[in-house]
Image (cartoon, rainbow, N blue to C red):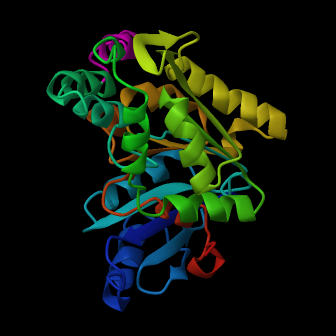
Amino acid sequence: MTDTVITIVAARENALDEASQARAVALAKSAGVENVSLDILHPATAIDITVSAHHDNLTAALRAAFADFGACDVFVQAKDEFRRKKLLVADMDATMIEGETLDELAAHFGLKDKVAPITQQAMRGEIDFAEALRMRVALLRGMPVSALQETLDHVRYSKGAKTLVGTMRRFGAGCVLISGGFDFFTNPVAQTLGFNKNIGNRLGIEYDMLTGEVMQPIVDKNTKKKTVEDESRLLGIDPRGAVAVGDGANDIPMLQTAGAGVGYFGKPAVVAATPFQIRHTDLTSILYMQGYTKREFAA
């Protein structure tokens, strides 16, 4: 019989003390199970609680029981052959890096106040992503290519991003960065973080100036979903062996296609779409939820 595992990751190191661990075990038992064991993934910071049973009602009961477990991110899933993933597919903007590169690019022309609201509408799923992309890029017509480099120079990487990719690569997983943003950014970001592959949109450029156009085909939510399917097939794995992470509505099909779709400080639509959410911690929680211990993390 398959077990159920509850992974708890605290926002602060040493916050999961013995009293908190005992409370977590008691909460697990409150779901009506007796066979419960505890494993330490990172002392006083990340733990696994394994329950010797697995079914949908139990999963729902455990998620409800741990919904308000302090400043921690909690992941409840089957402890099966698919727990440790063989593929990572990750969004870039506001996921692997902080902020939205297109918004920061617009800031060079004093257009951030016009572009950023469209970005937020698209990320919330209120307007079509491809149309929103065309609208925003049209506003950048005439911008010098040098502004792209200046924006790239100020990119800030999300906490845990390099450790997540490095650790999964170290243990043989394929890692793909995919973005509705632009390959001018995905190429160097992927190289810095250690991804095997990256996919992004292409900006129209003539005479070292942006034309205000996005080259076809546009990388959108369907591309992201198909990437999980295609990369799983290339690796010879079931999509249940993939983990995807993103923050916006255009990531939802990708998140729901992968065996584990993780929302990273996700918009409300993402929170509603998947039970796996990072709201308090950082990207290394995706490693803990796969059962990695801190000593297995890549330096």
For the question of whether residue 105 can be seen, the reply is yes
The residue depicted at 37 percent of the width and 42 percent of the height is: 150
As rendered, which of 284 and 62 lies closer to the eye? 284
Residue 283, given in percent of the width and then of the height, sits at: 46, 59
* Total marks placed: 0
Queried whether the magenta region covers residue 131, the answer comes back as yes
How far across and how far down the image is residue 201, in percent?
Answer: 53, 23
Instruction: Give residue 152's quadrant in the image.
Output: top left
Q: In this view, does 45 lie to the left or right of 162?
A: left
Q: Does the stretch in magenta take in 6? A: no
Magenta residue span: 125-136
Please tell me which residue lies in front, 211 or 28: 211
Which residue is outermost to the left?
113
Q: Is the magenta stretch mostly helix, strand or loop?
A: helix
Q: In which quarter of the image is the N terminus?
A: bottom right
Name the quadrant containing residue 17: bottom left
Instruction: Place residue 212 in its image quadrant.
Output: top left
Q: Which residue occupies the extreme front position in the image?
A: 207
199 above or below 1? above
Residue nearest the observer in this picture, 79 or 119? 119
* Residue 275 seen in this snapshot: no
Q: Quadrant of the C terminus?
A: bottom right
Please state the horizontal and vertical placement of residue 169, each as a whole percent of the image: 71, 58
